[in-house]
């Protein structure tokens, strides 16, 4: 019984809700045209296969185009500016018009802010195109392109060539086979977050569900806001570990907290009486429909059964498993889509879109209480060493070295952690930071992070808090889950850690590899350099 949405379609108009992107930024050599080292000769311009058609698809979709390119041949005197402009004129002749050329004429010894992996060219191109980096996607063939995109808060898609190093492929937030493949992915992701069919009117009471921990709840925020924009009332069912984060989300009218044994990481036995009480509680909501958000490794179906038993008439969820009559809208999402877009795409499949002006980014309620601690005047950094899953935490001794290195570079460092992490934060802060372990609740931590120049943290809830308040993140990212799916969303980021370590894609909660090599090898000097890239001056 996969009943479809009410009649109507958007085929002759723009679907509702903000699109993900305004502009696509393209690397030049190796991405648009064959890489001819230090080319100053228009005759040697050779477009890569499918480039013209791919760019035309982007133009037709209303996306603006810029080229962002390092041309150190200028600094080295291998060609003149006039020759370079002739090359670019030839590229436009072959590939069509480009709205802006962002060019770094320096080489590595200049220490400029524009040479990729610095984010300067991305900022310049976004400004020139009348948008912001977070509404840009950058397509390039090497790690420098991806690093520049991330450091500006833009989306990155890598199109590897034979010269792309394997570790650059491992580290990339997304990988496409070639430029046409990257363009198809950009257009697919953009379409996926907007409903195909309009709703006839507002929904009544919608029960949204997101179990699991703080980070899971935070990345679902955009999807929940989309539902809230089209519903009279939103009731959120969350788990005990996500409760504090759920309280920070805009758009939620009521919370129900319940531990779901098919989601919880260390579940007790299923208790029939508890499930009967939950079913009765869900029935008491009187929901007109339910939208069940999950991670890619969780099943919505046990809860869908209880919702059916509670009499919820319409249920939407992502399920690869056959749902029988448990779901009305069975949505499918390819692997690797950022979690916030995954949630938005489910909301869209259920008929909900973000209202105009609400960016598809993480957000918190505007009325957060002030933290119960005094924050230092002037700038500070936050280092958050803990994680709910040990496999995603940088070893404490390495975190201490990072704090020491940041302090030695002149930074004021606050070390944060939950009440159960006081021993950890005391140990890490002793290296040169201020220990705030257990000093605040999650809302207080959000305020502390909001005031920081930068957060240094693993793949854990506070990284998503930082994304929600717009604070740049140095992400010490264990590759147990895909970075493109779980990295800080749409906020300036530097990714560190060994992306190709043996724990990659294991989803392990405890590191399965002796010595925890993905994070134990993070060089504190690289953290210092990452902070400099994200926080110039
Ligand atoms: Zn430069």
Image: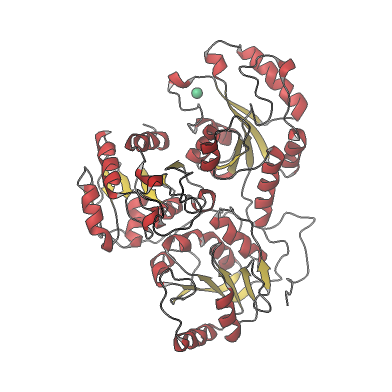
Question: What residue is at 62 percent from the left and 53 percent from the top?
Answer: 18
Q: Where's residue 142, x and y in %?
A: 56, 33
Residue 182 as seen in the image, left or right of residue 234? right
**Quadrant assignment, res 352:** bottom right
Q: How is the image coloured?
A: secondary structure
Q: Nearer the viewer, residue 207 or 172?
A: 172
Residue 193 as seen in the image, left or right of residue 107? right
Q: Where's residue 9, x and y in %?
A: 77, 63
Q: Where's residue 84, x and y in %?
A: 64, 17
Q: Residue furthest right?
A: 12
Q: Is residue 401 above or below residue 386?
A: above
Quadrant placement of the C terminus: top left
Q: Is residue 436 visible?
A: no
**Quadrant assignment, res 335:** bottom right
Q: Is residue 429 visible?
A: yes
Question: What residue is at 59 percent from the left and 81 percent from the top?
Answer: 305
Residue 494 as seen in the image, left or right of residue 324? left
Q: Nearer the viewer, residue 258 or 30?
A: 30
Q: Is residue 140 above or below residue 218?
A: above
Q: Is residue 72 above or below residue 134?
A: above
Q: Residue furthest front?
A: 514
């Amino acid at each position: 019984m996969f009943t479809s949405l009410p009649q109507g379609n958007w085929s002759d108009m723009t679907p509702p809700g903000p699109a993900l992107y305004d502009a696509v930024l393209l690397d030049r050599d190796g991405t648009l045209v064959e890489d001819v080292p230090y080319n100053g000769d228009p005759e040697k311009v050779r477009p890569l296969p499918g480039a013209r058609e791919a760019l035309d698809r982007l133009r037709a979709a209303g996306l603006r185009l810029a080229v962002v390119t390092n041309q150190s041949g200028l600094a080295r005197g291998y060609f003149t500016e006039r020759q370079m402009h002739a090359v670019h004129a030839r590229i436009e002749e072959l590939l069509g018009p480009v709205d802006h050329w962002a060019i770094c004429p320096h080489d590595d010894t200049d220490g400029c802010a524009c040479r990729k992996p610095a984010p300067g060219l991305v900022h310049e191109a976004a400004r020139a195109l009348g948008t912001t980096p977070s509404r840009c996607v950058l397509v390039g063939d090497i790690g420098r392109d991806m690093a520049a995109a991330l450091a500006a808060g833009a989306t990155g898609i890598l199109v590897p060539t034979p010269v792309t190093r394997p570790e650059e492929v491992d580290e990339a937030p997304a990988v496409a086979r070639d430029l046409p493949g990257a363009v198809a992915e950009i257009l697919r992701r953009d379409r996926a977050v907007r409903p195909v069919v309009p709703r006839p009117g507002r929904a009544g009471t919608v029960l949204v569900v997101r179990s699991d921990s703080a980070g899971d709840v935070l990345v679902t925020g955009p999807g929940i806001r989309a539902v809230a924009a089209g519903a009279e009332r939103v009731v959120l069912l969350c788990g005990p570990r996500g409760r504090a984060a759920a309280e920070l989300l805009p758009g939620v009218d009521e919370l129900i907290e319940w531990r779901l044994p098919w989601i919880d990481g260390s579940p007790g036995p299923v208790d029939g009486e508890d499930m009967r009480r939950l079913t009765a509680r869900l029935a008491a909501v009187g929901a007109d429909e339910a939208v069940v958000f999950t991670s890619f490794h969780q099943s919505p179906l046990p809860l869908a059964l209880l919702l059916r038993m509670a009499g919820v008439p319409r249920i939407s969820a992502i399920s690869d498993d056959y749902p029988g009559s448990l779901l009305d809208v069975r949505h499918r999402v390819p692997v690797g889509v950022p979690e916030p877009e995954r949630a938005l795409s489910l909301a869209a499949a259920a008929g909900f879109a973000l209202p105009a002006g609400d960016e598809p980014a993480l957000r918190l309620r505007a009325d957060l209480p002030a933290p119960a601690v005094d924050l230092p005047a002037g700038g500070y950094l936050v280092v958050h060493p803990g994680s709910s899953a040990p496999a995603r935490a940088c070893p404490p001794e390495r975190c201490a070295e990072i704090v020491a290195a940041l302090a030695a570079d002149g930074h004021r460092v606050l070390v944060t952690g939950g009440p159960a992490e006081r021993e950890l934060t005391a140990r890490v802060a002793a290296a040169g930071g201020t220990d705030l372990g257990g000093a605040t609740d999650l809302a207080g931590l959000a305020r502390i992070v909001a005031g920081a120049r930068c957060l240094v943290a693993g793949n854990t809830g506070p990284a998503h808090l930082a994304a929600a308040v717009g604070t740049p993140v140095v992400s010490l990212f264990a590759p147990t889950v895909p970075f493109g799916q779980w990295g800080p969303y749409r906020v300036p980021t530097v990714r560190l850690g060994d992306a190709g370590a043996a724990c990659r894609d294991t989803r392990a909660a405890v590191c399965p590899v002796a010595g925890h090599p993905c994070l134990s090898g993070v060089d504190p000097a690289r953290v210092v350099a990452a902070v400099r890239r994200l926080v110039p001056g």
